[in-house]
Amino acid sequence: MGAIHLSNLDFSHDDSQSLFAKIASDLLEQGYSIQLQALPQHMSEALYEQVTKLHEQEFIRAGVGRKDEFQQNQFIRRDEICWIDGSTATGRCWLDWTAQLQNYLNRRLFLGLFSFESHYAHYARGDFYKRHFDAFHGQSNRVLTVVTYLNQNWQKEDGGQMVLYRNQDDLIGTQILPTMGTIAVFLSEEFPHEVLPAMRDRYSIAGWYRLNNSLQGRIDPPR
């Protein structure tokens, strides 16, 4: 695949608005939205190209918990991550697209989304992430999760499905195959989920929209 320069691409406003409308409608009706191969193709390809060319030292072993509670536990998750900071044209294009989604959802659903953070995730063969919530009620300002998949020619036998459970009592869930450009959006506090073991290298972006919890001059950091 040749180099892709996203800064020169003109993504269809109408297509994005149509996708955003579907996501908003699903969130309003059921709290989550799964859009198959919905990310603009050129953006998916550029993000895939970037994540697969990252040097090993640019990834860090993922953990669980925040700040003083952060810990690495390979019995819970085994993926590695690289934060997206907008220092590249590809990263800036991704962040611009998520900002457009944020603005749309705020206008349509009055969610009060304030900021966004995201990272690449790489699951090597055998890696997984056990069932968990992205946020707990009253303990985090993450309110909306966005997961985007960056895997070419992914088949069911490759594993690595994300299983999204409707609530804590759901033991079956909905399996989402991590195919290129597929997007999953869901309320962070409401839906437990897990990643099944991958049978080959699996790439994705995990991101979260947050509320503004800054109080009396104390800035709540993005992460």
Image (cartoon, rainbow, N blue to C red):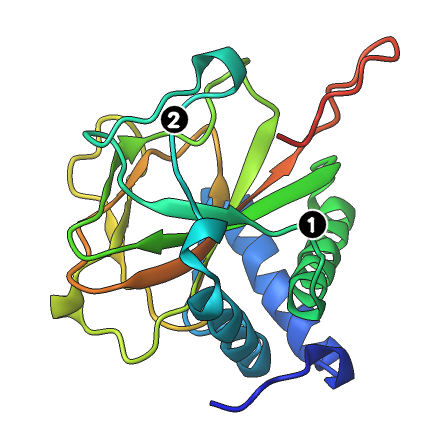
Is the residue marked by circle 1 packed among few (<14), some (14-19), or many (20+) residues within 10 Å?
A: many
Residue 6 left/right relative to 125: right
Q: Which mark is residue 137?
A: none
Dot 1 amino acid type:
Leu
Q: Are marks 1 and 2 in contact (CB under 8 Å)?
A: no
Looking at the rendered image, the quarter that the C terminus falls into is top right
Q: Nearer the viewer, residue 73 or 145?
A: 73
- Circle 2 SS class: loop
Residue 208, image x, y percentages: 57, 41
Seen as rendered, the residue at the extreme right is 217
Q: Would you say residue 196 is visible in this rendering?
A: yes
Residue 160, image x, y percentages: 23, 56
Seen as rendered, the residue at the extreme left is 157
The residue at 57%/30% (across/down) is: 142
Q: Nearer the viewer, residue 42 or 29?
A: 42
The residue at 73%/54% (across/down) is: 99
**Could you tell which of marks 1 and 2 lies nearer the N-terminus?**
2
The residue at 75%/77% (across/down) is: 13
Is the residue marked by circle 2 packed among few (<14), some (14-19), or many (20+) residues within 10 Å?
A: some
Q: Nearer the viewer, residue 71 or 164?
A: 71
Q: Which residue is mark 1?
A: 105
Q: Which residue is mark 2?
A: 64
Residue 87 location, quadrant: bottom right
Q: Is residue 10 positioned above or below 111 on the image?
A: below
Residue 18 left/right relative to 161: right
Q: Would you say residue 185 is visible in this rendering?
A: no
Dot 2 amino acid type:
Val
Residue 43, image x, y percentages: 58, 75
Distance, label 1 to label 2, CA atoms, is 28 Å
- Circle 1 SS class: helix
Residue 81, image x, y percentages: 44, 46
